[in-house]
Image: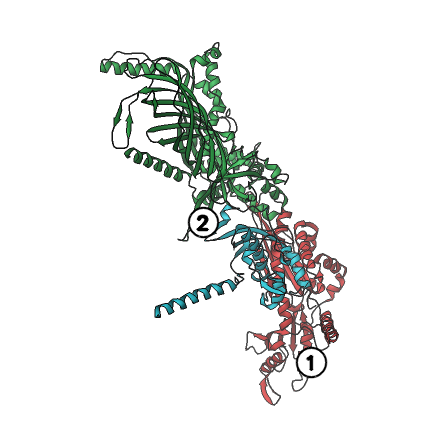
Amino acid sequence: MKKLLTVFVIFLIGGGIQIMAQAKQPKIMVVPSRIYCNKHGYMREIDNQGEKVYVEDFDKLYREDENMRQVISKIEEMIKDRNYTKIANLESVLQKLQQDEAELSAIQSKNTMAQVRETPYERLMRKAKADIIINVYFDIKKQGPRSYISFNIQGIDAYTNEPIASASGDGEPSFSATPGKLIEEAVLSHIDNFLAQLQSYFDEMFKIGRKVKIRILVWDDADFDLEEEYDYNGETMELSEILENWFYDNSVEGRYDIEGGGEANSMIAEVRIPLYDERKRPIAARQYARKLRKFLRGAPFNITSKLYAKGLGEAWIVLGGK
Amino acid sequence: MKKNLILIILTGLTFFGCGSKKEITVPVDFTNYEAHGAGQGVEGTALIKVYSYGYTVDKAVEKAKFDAIHAVLFKGVPGSNVARPMVPDGYDAHKDYFDNFFGLYKVKAGKRTKIDPLDLSKEFNAPYKLYVQLSNDGTIDPSDRLKVGNMYKVGVIVSVNIRELRKRLEKDGIIHSLNYGF
Amino acid sequence: MKRMVYLFSILFLIYTLQCKAQKLTSDDFGVSTRQNITYVMLKPSGQYARIIEERIGPEKLPHPNQVNLIHIGNAIISDEDQIQQYKIPNRIIEVLYFKDGKFTYENIVNMARYTMTDADALTFNATSVGQSGSAERKYYKSILGGNWILLYSIEDLHSQEEEYDRIDERNRQIAAKSGEEFKKVDRILVGYLAKLKVKLFRIGLNSDEELAKFEQYVFSDFDENKPEEIKEKIFKYDFPLITSYKWQKTIDLRKTQPKNLAELRGLTERDFLLKLLSPDFIMKKINFFIEKRMENFKVKRSVYETKPDILIKVGTKENMHTNDRMVIYEKVLGRDGKEKIKRVGAIRLIGKPVENRDYATGKQNPSRFKQYFGRKIEKGMLAETFASKHLFQIGYLPGDFQFQWGWVLKKSFTYLLVGFEVYPTEWDNQVVNTVLLHGGINKEIVLAPNFTLDLHPGLFIGFMSYGDREQSGSDEYQYKYTENSGEDTDSEQNKNDGIGLYLFPSMNFYVSPSTKFGVQFRLSQYLFYNNDNELKNTPQKARINLFIQFEF
């Protein structure tokens, strides 16, 4: 009997491990925050379809900024210390990007959806395939002759751009500590609290799924909009209502939220999607939106649509054409 | 006669009271301490200032070590690098584990008796003691030492090895590591 | 009986005053850090001005024991107001921030290292930033907030010869008024007399607000590369100055002529003065005052261990010596919910004080102490140095009055006692008054906390005088006696000179760290000349004497 029980327990645990092993670890990338880059001159001007915009020049930063490099590697080290290995290192991603310069220029959007075009930052993120971006900002300030560090670390969900964890504060002013020591102290005193928040974010994610943003638009020249009524499941409903019902049915525990409301040709939904599809494949916004597209293609809607994935956590479905 | 009877009853009650008093074990008062961060320690540790009570100063210091671990696990220490509790489920979710971890019961001749945390000696040994130590050489700051009735309230700075503590709890399946579930 | 009541009321008054004086307030409760002091001298005047300035100018004084000394160069001013006028506080603060004209924290960090206990210094150097950062801030604050200016002056330095002239002048005036015959005083002593005046100021950066205000002013738009700007700002800042203590003492540089005449022969007046006016002598006076009166300059440490010995982390760095005493205090929560400071006991250092470095590195245990007064001492209580220089003893046994004055010999828990005593005895079947001058040493042996055994051997010289016995009450006697003035021969009373040895063992009970009651067993052997000039034993009587002894 005892043996049987042991076998049973082992089976249970083994099964558990098996299921866990299939899960996909979110990828984390530590990135200097935009404000840091701006403050220290790591920005460059690019031409975005005639409009001049400033983007982060990470390449220059890596070449010149020792302190930030130290911060990033220290944070990565602390995360690895927690048995978490899925980390995209910004520096190596940058190197990869340079190699694939040709590929980058090939990505263009069709037709009029110009704003879908990715900025270099988004391109970087897509390349890194990071699920969680850790933005780091620090500033070594002077209080008279003493210097102290102001530190801020923020984890952002790449899918929804929502902050998921953050820690910040000022260190003790010191007149003898080197910047390196100040930085070390700042990382050490904030990283544990930060990772604790990240942990609870993961716990929550396992419980209620990932949050993604699905934006539904209607082409200007389409002969219908979201207020068009359809007979579906024996009821006559507006398309927007049907979509809402679909989100309700296809989200974890029915968690979804419609942003804004009432527009005839646009709808933004924030949905908690399961981590895996029926075949245990990890899914992101694109895969999820594909499912919705499939649903709309079917009767009674017969709507064709185009799918854009912006980053990993946002997908656009444009109804009424391809 | 009536008076006598009352007297007898009263005496009886008094004896009863005394008898039951002996059997009451002092409740394990976990919450009777104050803890806050005391700067950043070396990597993998948290420096915590704990004010604890004890019947003697030495016992209060031992209780402070006990309380420091308790704070790190279940309360979180504001102003330190463990502001959030390490075990958010709380003590009761893993009661047997933590009873053992804190060495709260003493088994003697098959009988399990509860240990009074206010009465811990230096020699007292339990797993939690592996992860906590006084941050200085044992000197107690006179301004952190207050006599309250027959007890002492003592404040000491202890260093908790949070990295090793976390690893143990992860190994024992009490808390998840970051990669849990993936 | 009335006399007893008076006596005991006076004793009680002294006792309460003493307890009050020894009481620690909660502001002063805490481990001490070393303070910084700067000497400033008021410009001396008179014919000896140059000698005073040369000999005991601020830079000539030796290093004090309990403080860091900050030299700001030639600091002699002619008026108290000139402390601010001459920007003396500014010069002191400048010394802290600058070295060789460069802005630096080196001085402050070094001073902090010296300020902390060695154990702290070891951790300060070894631990990570956060900890040393907060330690740094703590010591930085204590160093800037603990700056003192000691203004001292030697006034009215004059020779003993002049002193006699002054006395004569006074006497002549009195004689002229009263019409009596004027008589010159005997000139027995040679030497000098002067007044030492000490005034202590604190540079008021000891509160967080004042320090922040100062830093805000000096270090706004701070540029390390422009030291001149910072210097100028520090120089312009108006530092608050707090008068903390005033103190005045007559210093006695006199010696009796017969004893030193040979030795002094051949010395010029100037050389003689130089010999007497030593910086060490002045410093000793100032130092005692600093250590005893000012809470900030006392050594305060935590009781580190109590079993088996009381160990405290003090040592040679704190200028501790064998038998130095410390008073123990603890903080108690009163019934009204307020924290109170209570005195627990007193201890004295046994064995040699330990080198601070040795206990910090674990080579040796901290200094050992033994309790001689109070309740049980426990870990973490506050120990504070307690210095006393003099003692005063009043004893009583029926019909007897005695009074003793003593000096505490610092290094051996022994007192040097001289006394004056009057008591009746029987001599040749008559009751006579005996007047004794005696002196000896008093060695104390601690039996248990609060209880000591004192051994007090000594010598006496004395005389007896026969007097009339008067009854003034049912159980009290009064005796008339005259003092030996040497030449007074026309008295009807008989006087007999005598000499003797004594040993007074006593059992004592301490009631405060510096007050004890004792029961003395008087064993003595007196030899007196009788009227026929025969040396005779007095009748021996073992007597019991009650006394109370104060140290201050």
Q: Nearer the viewer, residue C178 or C273?
A: C178
**Where residue B161 sits in the image (x, y, percent)?**
64, 55
The answer to which quarter of the image holds residue A29 is bottom right
**Where residue B140 sits in the image (x, y, percent)?**
54, 47
Q: Which mark is residue A314?
A: none
Q: Secondary structure at mark 1?
A: helix
- A76 left or right of C447 in image: right
Q: Nearer the viewer, residue C461 or C10?
A: C461
Q: Chain of mark 2?
A: C
Q: Which mark is residue A294?
A: 1
**Where residue B168 sits in the image (x, y, percent)?**
67, 60
The answer to which quarter of the image holds residue C120 is top right
How many callouts does the rendering have? 2
**Where residue B114 sits in the image (x, y, percent)?**
57, 63
Q: Relative to residue C287, is residue A51 depicted above or below?
A: below
Q: Residue furthest top?
A: C266
Note whether residue C492 is visible.
Answer: yes
Between disc 1 and disc 2, the foreground one is 2
Q: Chain of mark 1?
A: A
Q: Can you tell which chain is drawn green?
A: C
Q: Can you tell which chain is drawn red?
A: A
Picture colour for chain B: cyan
Q: Which residue is mark 2?
A: C332
- Tell me which amino acid carries mark 2: Val
Which residue corresponds to the image point at 54% horizontal and 56% vertical from the top-left?
Answer: B35
Q: Residue furthest bottom?
A: A234
Image quarter of the C terminus of chain B: bottom right
